[in-house]
Image (spheres, helix red, strand yellow):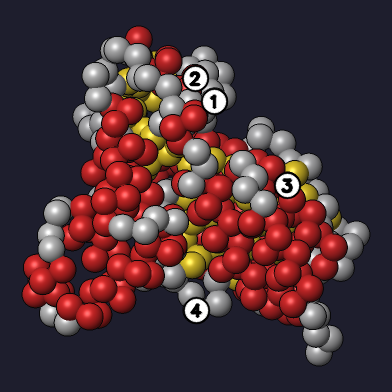
């Protein structure tokens, strides 16, 4: 089997990750690097809410958004092969459609109903996971003329997937929030009701503003995160998941919004409508994302949570069954990753990023 050298790809991607690019610029640069080793005609990079695994946005290359709703239906409602949620649970979170279907891609409903329509023959998918958390997704496509994706190419993507996850995590969470953050306007949460055809049939005044903040319109294309959560709510109604979907997403102004959806009971039969609520995410929802963006180990996260509660070293040691010296070692590592030199600076970093902007 032909092998491909991974290290040159990794080094170029590390430079991209360190460049401090915004989400869209980061994805474009990362795709440029990948394309030199794993050629493709089109691609889609999706960002995920790491707490729920729901899609919150996407950057496409040579793809139309016309099929977004159909794609989300296949991803969240219908059964198919290589679903991103399934890939994220695998030790090797990469799948090639031809391999997974035994050389017969028509076994995939996504292939039959979507790919054949717009001329895609080959697909390579990856869940971008680091430290057990999926931060993004990647799908690469080739048309019918080029060769299928090889095992060697899939190995390259698998090898750099954690680094791509770090890049997505960094771009999504550690951008300078305070420079972007806008004061939320009055009006409370936005609520909208979507019918079985995906049309908004009822909405509050605040919903229009919040949907626009997420890059969509009520009368036209809804934001990706809303399409994903609506599809997931239909999946919940169909019994595919046990809890109603919820996601956190960074809006265009830089603030974090919480989005949740629930199917309405339809006593007359037919597909249920879905009610979606959009509201500003509170610090208790956002702080875990900010902490996760530092790349902390699970134990380091426990220590940070205790520090934010004001616990002393001895109290942290007792609660986590550690020695005081071990707690100090964890704190030293946390400080280095957060770019601070003391507990006070760590608490201030979180406070000024997430709490102070909300004060009157």
Q: Which mark is residue 28?
A: 3
Q: Which mark is residue 2?
A: none
Please name whichever residue, 32 or 158, is drawn nearer the observer in this view of the structure.
32
The reply to whether callout 1 and callout 2 are in contact (CB within 8 Å) is yes
Packing grade of label 4 (10 A; few <14, some 14-19, many >=20) is few
Marks 2 and 4, how far apart in space?
Answer: 38 Å
Mark 1 sits on what residue?
Answer: 215
Please name whichever residue, 245 or 332, is drawn nearer the observer in this view of the structure.
332
Q: Secondary structure at mark 1?
A: loop
Packing grade of label 3 (10 A; few <14, some 14-19, many >=20) is some
* Left or right of 264 in this view: 23: right
Q: Which mark is residue 212?
A: 2
The reply to whether callout 3 and callout 1 are in contact (CB within 8 Å) is no
Please name whichever residue, 218 or 172, is drawn nearer the observer in this view of the structure.
172
Q: Secondary structure at mark 4?
A: loop
The reply to whether callout 4 and callout 1 are in contact (CB within 8 Å) is no
Tell which tag, 3 or 2, sits nearer the viewer.
Answer: 3
Marks 4 and 1, how far apart in space?
Answer: 35 Å
Q: Secondary structure at mark 3?
A: helix
């Amino acid at each position: 089997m032909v092998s491909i050298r991974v290290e040159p790809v990794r080094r170029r991607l590390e430079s991209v990750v360190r460049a401090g690019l915004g989400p869209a610029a980061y994805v474009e640069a990362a795709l440029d690097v990948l394309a030199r080793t794993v050629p493709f005609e089109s691609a889609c990079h999706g960002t995920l809410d790491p707490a729920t695994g729901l899609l919150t946005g996407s950057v496409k290359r040579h793809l139309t958004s016309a099929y977004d709703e159909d794609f989300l239906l296949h991803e969240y409602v219908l059964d198919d092969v290589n679903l991103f949620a399934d890939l994220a649970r695998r030790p090797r979170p990469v799948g090639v459609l031809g391999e997974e279907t035994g050389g017969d891609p028509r076994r995939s409903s996504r292939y039959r109903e979507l790919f054949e329509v717009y001329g895609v023959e080959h697909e390579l998918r990856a869940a971008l996971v680091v430290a057990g958390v999926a931060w993004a997704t990647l799908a690469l496509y080739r048309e019918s003329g080029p060769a299928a994706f090889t095992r060697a190419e899939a190995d390259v993507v698998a090898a750099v997937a954690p680094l791509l996850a770090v890049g997505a995590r960094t771009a999504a969470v550690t951008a300078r929030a305070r420079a972007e953050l806008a004061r939320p306007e009055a009006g409370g949460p936005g609520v909208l009701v979507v019918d079985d055809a995906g049309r908004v049939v009822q909405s509050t005044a605040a919903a229009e503003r919040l949907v626009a903040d997420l890059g969509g319109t009520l009368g036209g294309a809804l934001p990706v995160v809303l399409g994903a959560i609506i599809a997931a709510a239909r999946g919940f109604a169909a019994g595919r998941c046990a809890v109603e979907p919820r996601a956190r997403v960074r809006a265009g102004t830089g603030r974090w919004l919480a989005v949740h959806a629930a199917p309405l009971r339809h006593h007359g039969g037919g597909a249920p409508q879905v009610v979606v609520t959009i509201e500003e995410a509170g610090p208790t929802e956002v702080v875990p994302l900010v902490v996760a963006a530092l790349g902390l180990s699970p134990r380091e996260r426990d220590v940070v949570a205790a520090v934010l509660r004001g616990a002393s070293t001895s109290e942290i040691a007792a609660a986590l069954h550690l020695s005081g010296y071990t707690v100090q070692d964890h704190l030293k590592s946390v400080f280095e990753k957060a770019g601070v030199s003391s507990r006070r600076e760590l608490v201030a970093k979180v406070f000024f990023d997430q709490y102070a902007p909300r004060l009157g």
